[in-house]
Every structure is written in C-alpha cells, then in structure tokens.
Image: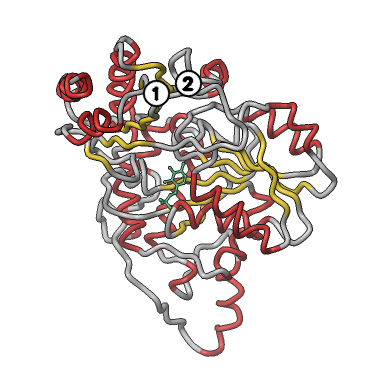
C-alpha cells in the first residue's frame, strides 16, 4: 500500500497490516496458523528457498520464519516506528535478547543504561558476560558525556527512555551521536512511549525493541515482542533471531494487530487520565515525589518535552516513609488498582517497585510505587486512591 509513508499515525493504525483484497474481502488480516507451507513442485524448490530469504519478498516457507499474520503485524509496526522492517518475537524480553545477541560477539564491550528493565538487566549482568561480552552500566542522564566511556571495542549502547521504575528520560539523540561517532550502534527499548509518542529512527536509534505485551496488545491477554531495525541491520538481525529459534505464535501476533487498531485512542486516554492522577498525587501530603516524565519533577523532563510527542499511562510515586503495615493497608484495600506485574492493558495496576541501581540517583527515601492508569473513569480511580490514603494514615 503506497500512501503508508505519508499517512498520519491514526490512519496508519487503521490501515497498516491489512489488505482485504488479498483475503477474500475480510476487513482484518485472518489468523493463519501454519507450520508448513507447501511448494508447487520439486523443480522450483531452489528458487523458492532463495525467494524465502529475500527480505524484500514475503514468501512463507516454514512457520518459524513467519506467516501472513505475523508479517502483517511486522509491517504495521515498522510503518509506525519509522524503521526499515520489524521482526515479531515471543515476548519483549525475547526481543531484547534477540536483538542484542544478534549484534554482539565475544570481545565486544556494551554500555547499558542503569535504569533498564529489570530482566534486561539480568540478561546483561548474567548471560552476556558468559558469551565473552563485557558489560558496563552507565547513569541514565549521562547524555553526550558517555563519550568518556566509549572504547575501540564498544559495539553497542543500550538505552531505555523513560527508564523502568525511576522514569529518567535519556538524551537519545546525544547517545546516538556519540555511539555513531565511535562506530557503535544504539539499541533502545521504546515500550513506554510506543512509536506513537516517540519516533526512535528520527532520533538516531538503530534498533528499537518493544514489549508488545504492554500497549500494542493492550488487553493483558498475550505475550508479544517486536524488534524494528534500520535497513543496514535488518538481514543480520533477522537471520540471527530466527537461527536462535525466536518466533511468536500467530494468535498472539493477531492480538497485537487487533490491539494496534485502537492504540491511538487508548494511549491518548491513558495519557489524559494518568496525568490527572499524577497531578492529584503531587498535591497529597503522603507523597514525596511523582516521577512522571510530563511533570517538571521527573529527571530528564526537558528532554521529554523536546523529543516526545506524548506520555503514556505508567509512572512512579515516592511516598513519605510509612510503616510497612500502613503501606500494605493502602495497597491491599484498593478496589480498582490491582497489584500485578506488567502494564499497558485497559485496566489499572499498582505495585511496589524497586529502583535498584548501581548509580544511586536523586530518589528520595520512601516507598516507590509504580502505577499504570487504565481506562476506568479517572474520578473513580482518584476516589480509590483517596480511600487508600485514609487507610494509610490510620
Ligand atoms: C515488560 C517489559 C519488557 C519485557 O516484556 P515481556 O513481554 O514481559 O517479556 C521489556 N521492557 C520494558 C520496559 C517492559 O516494561
């Protein structure tokens, strides 16, 4: 579909990754469940295999390399991210592991932001060193001063903005400039903003990953990841992640496509409600600090204003120190904020978060909570928290 490049994001969300004319007129790309695609005859096999390897064609030959449903999801995400092409993955963590393992080899040095997603941190701390890759963490707000850490062997800088739990916003264009000047690549986790609110390839990112489990799927009912790369890196990353055996299930990719159709309206509502809750929290006496990138207290707020197109529904709150029993009474009595892992679904969540860091930041001392503001009426959410604070005080 030609106009895709000119369309605005809401139009892309509605039309990317589907082509009724190719599917008997059905509005949605059907769910293809397939391991095997048969080829026409023995004589054409060599040609067929070669075509299957061509990144510009979409020939399906075996389920582990994708099928029309996963390809439709990949096309839609690539159009939104502004990268060359995307690769569907079975989870967000698989997308991180796959992208990193595709780009580094023994002897390389990688620089990782200190506020990266917790399981990514464990991957970098525990798995990468065993493959002969040296990992060094850097403070998230380092910006262009990262130049002092670059070495001849530095192959990759790994960023996440805003970072998990502590929400520091990184200077992605500065990291990209320095990485590229030293012959290294910039990989970024773009899960929080989604490509609607941050355009990674405009800001110099080479490989963007997303936990599609969160906003893209958007309904807390599937695990899904996606890697998007520049044209120069696509073939290498595709070959490596498929050799590592990574592919997502068709049902989950289909749920990702379904989720994309409403991503724009959902995300704008998450943004509005989360900002209302965050502002209400800033005025509460029980609260020390609200870590929301769109509020001035958040480290890197100026970078957020410069580079981001909006804020999603996930943010942090530091409470004044309270006895554990009071904190638990606050949390356990909430009716609308369930406590659970993950985020990005239609429903609100809250959890005690950990900002374990190598470089202690400017976080005040007190319990750190992470809120995901869902699509409930914001007045009901605020009333729920208000009753929670009454429990906290007694
Ligand atoms: C959840 C999350 C991931 C991992 O995604 P999964 O689908 O749970 O594997 C990666 N990055 C961020 C920022 C996340 O919040």
Between 118 and 292, which is closer to the camera in this rendering?
118
Contact between labelled residues 2 and 1, with CB atoms less than 8 Å apart: yes
Image coordinates for residue 365, horizontal then vertical, percent: 46, 23
- The answer to which quarter of the image holds residue 250 is bottom left
N-term mark: 1 or 2: 1
Name the residue at 47% across, 14% down: 297
The answer to whether residue 369 is left or right of residue 142 is: left
Distance of mark 1 from mark 2, alpha carbons? 7 Å
Which residue is tagged 2? 364
Q: Is residue 332 above or below residue 105?
A: above
Name the residue at 49% across, 57% down: 94
Here the colouring is: secondary structure
Name the residue at 49% across, 87% down: 41
The numbered mark at residue 61 is none
Q: Is residue 368 above or below residue 285?
A: below
Crowding around mark 2 (Cα neighbors within 10 Å: few <14, some 14 to 19, many 20+) is few
Between 187 and 237, which is closer to the camera in this rendering?
187
Image coordinates for residue 79, horizontal then vertical, percent: 48, 42
The secondary element bearing badge 1 is classed as strand
The answer to whether residue 31 is left or right of residue 228 is: left
Q: Is residue 45 above or below residue 235?
A: below
The answer to whether residue 34 is left or right of residue 233 is: left
* Residue 21 shows in this picture: no
Name the residue at 29% across, 60% down: 30
Crowding around mark 1 (Cα neighbors within 10 Å: few <14, some 14 to 19, many 20+) is many
Which residue is tagged 1? 318
**Some atom of ligand 1 lies within 8 Å of the CB belonging to the residue at label 2:** no
Image coordinates for residue 178, horizontal then vertical, percent: 75, 33
Label total for image = 2
């Amino acid at each position: 579909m030609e106009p895709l490049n000119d369309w605005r994001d809401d139009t892309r969300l509605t039309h990317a990754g589907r082509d009724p004319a190719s599917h008997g007129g059905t509005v949605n790309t059907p769910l293809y469940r397939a391991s095997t695609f048969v080829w026409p005859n023995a004589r054409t096999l060599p040609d067929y295999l070669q075509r299957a390897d061509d990144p510009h064609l979409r020939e399906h030959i075996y389920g582990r390399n994708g099928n029309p449903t996963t390809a439709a999801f990949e096309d839609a995400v690539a159009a939104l991210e502004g990268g060359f092409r995307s690769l569907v993955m079975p989870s967000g963590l698989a997308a991180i592991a796959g992208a990193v393992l595709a780009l580094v080899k023994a002897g390389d040095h990688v620089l990782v932001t200190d506020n990266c997603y917790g399981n990514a941190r464990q991957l970098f701390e525990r798995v990468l060193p065993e493959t002969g890759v040296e990992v060094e963490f850097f403070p998230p707000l380092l910006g262009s001063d990262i130049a002092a850490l670059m070495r001849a062997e530095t192959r990759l800088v790994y960023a996440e903005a805003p970072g998990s739990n502590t929400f520091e916003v990184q200077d992605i264009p500065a990291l990209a400039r320095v990485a590229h000047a030293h012959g290294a690549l910039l990989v970024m986790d773009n899960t929080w903003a989604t490509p609607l609110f941050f355009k990674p390839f405009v800001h110099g990112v080479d490989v963007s990953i997303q936990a599609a489990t969160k906003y893209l799927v958007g309904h807390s009912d599937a695990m899904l990841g996606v890697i998007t790369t520049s044209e120069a890196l696509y073939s290498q990353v595709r070959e490596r992640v498929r050799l590592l055996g990574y592919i997502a299930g068709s049902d989950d990719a289909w749920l990702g496509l379904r989720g994309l159709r409403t991503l724009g309206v959902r995300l704008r509502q998450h943004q509005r409600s989360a900002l209302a809750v965050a502002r209400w929290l800033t005025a509460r006496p029980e609260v020390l600090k609200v870590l929301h990138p769109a509020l001035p207290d958040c480290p890197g707020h100026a970078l957020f204003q410069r580079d981001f197109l909006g804020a999603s529904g996930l943010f942090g709150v530091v409470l004044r120190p309270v006895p554990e029993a009071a904190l638990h009474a606050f949390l356990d009595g909430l009716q609308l904020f369930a406590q659970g892992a993950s985020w990005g679904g239609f429903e609100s969540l809250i959890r005690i978060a950990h900002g374990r860091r190598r470089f202690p930041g400017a976080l005040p001392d007190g319990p750190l909570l992470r809120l995901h503001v869902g699509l409930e009426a914001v007045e009901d959410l605020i009333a729920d928290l208000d009753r929670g604070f009454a429990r906290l005080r007694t």
